Amino acid sequence: MPTDIGSYGVSAEIVLPTAGKDELGTGRYQFNVGGLIVYPVSPHLLTAGVIKQSTSVAGDHDRDKISNTEIRFIPVFILSDGWAISGELRQTWEHKSDQDWQRIEVSLNKQFDIHWAGVLSTSRDFGDRKDHGAALIAMKYFF
């Protein structure tokens, strides 16, 4: 929903357990809700704030339930010729295990045409899920 100073929205999703093996996550359904605020600082800078709650609601009772809350801050720097640099600062709380962790991610994005885009990204998790980082190179096709 656009406003005079930005846009906001809400979402809801249902995640169905479609994996074929327990190791891939089969057996639990999720109901997730979220909210989003987007504020254009300038024609070349957008900022977004997201809050999302993910919760197990049914399914295989032998598998652990999840209940996560995430808060994200996402700046997007829009450059010329279809280029953009985006970042993400994420705080996650896992309510069933009392774990919390943070993620920092930076991406270089290029929109080649109406259907094709590329992404070069790096990220790292901190806190209870600390890792050594990850890198991603991807091509996206939009239908």
Image (tube, rainbow, N blue to C red):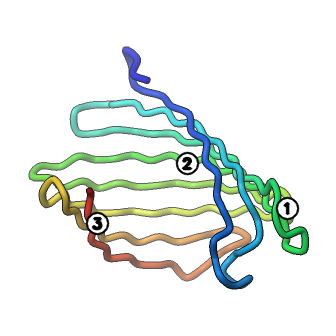
Nearer the N terminus, badge 1 or badge 3? 1
Residue that numbered label 2 is attached to: 72
Q: Estimate the x, y position of residue 51 in percent, counting from the top left.
A: 61, 42
Q: Name the residue under label 3.
A: 140
For numbered disc 2, what is the local secondary structure?
A: strand
Q: Mark 1: which amino acid?
A: Asp
Foreground pick, 96 / 115 = 115
The local secondary structure at tag 1 comes to loop
Marks 1/2: CA–CA distance: 19 Å
Report the residue that reaches farthest toward the top: 4
Quadrant of image for the N terminus: top left
In the rendered structure, the answer to whether residue 86 lies left or right of residue 53 reads left
Looking at the picture, does residue 5 appear above or below residue 110? Answer: above
Labels 3 & 2 near each other (Cβ < 8 A): no
Pick the quarter of the image with the C terminus.
Answer: bottom left
Q: Quick one: label 1 or label 2, which is nearer the N terminus?
A: 2
Residue 55's place in the image compared with 141, above or below, is above
Q: Neighbour class for label 2 at 10 Å: few (<14), some, many (≥20)?
A: some
Give coordinates of residue 139: x percent, y percent.
27, 71
Residue placed at 57% from the left, 55% from the top?
90
Q: What element carries label 3?
A: strand
| CA neighbours of label 1 inside 10 A, class few (<14), some (14 to 19), many (20+) | few
Locate residue 119: give its quadrant.
bottom left
Instruction: Give the residue type at disc 3.
Output: Lys
Residue drawn at x 85%, y 65% is 97
Rendered view: 42 above or below 96: above
Amino acid identity at mark 2 = Arg
Q: Which residue is drawn at 39% across and 62% down?
A: 106
Q: Name the residue under label 1.
A: 98
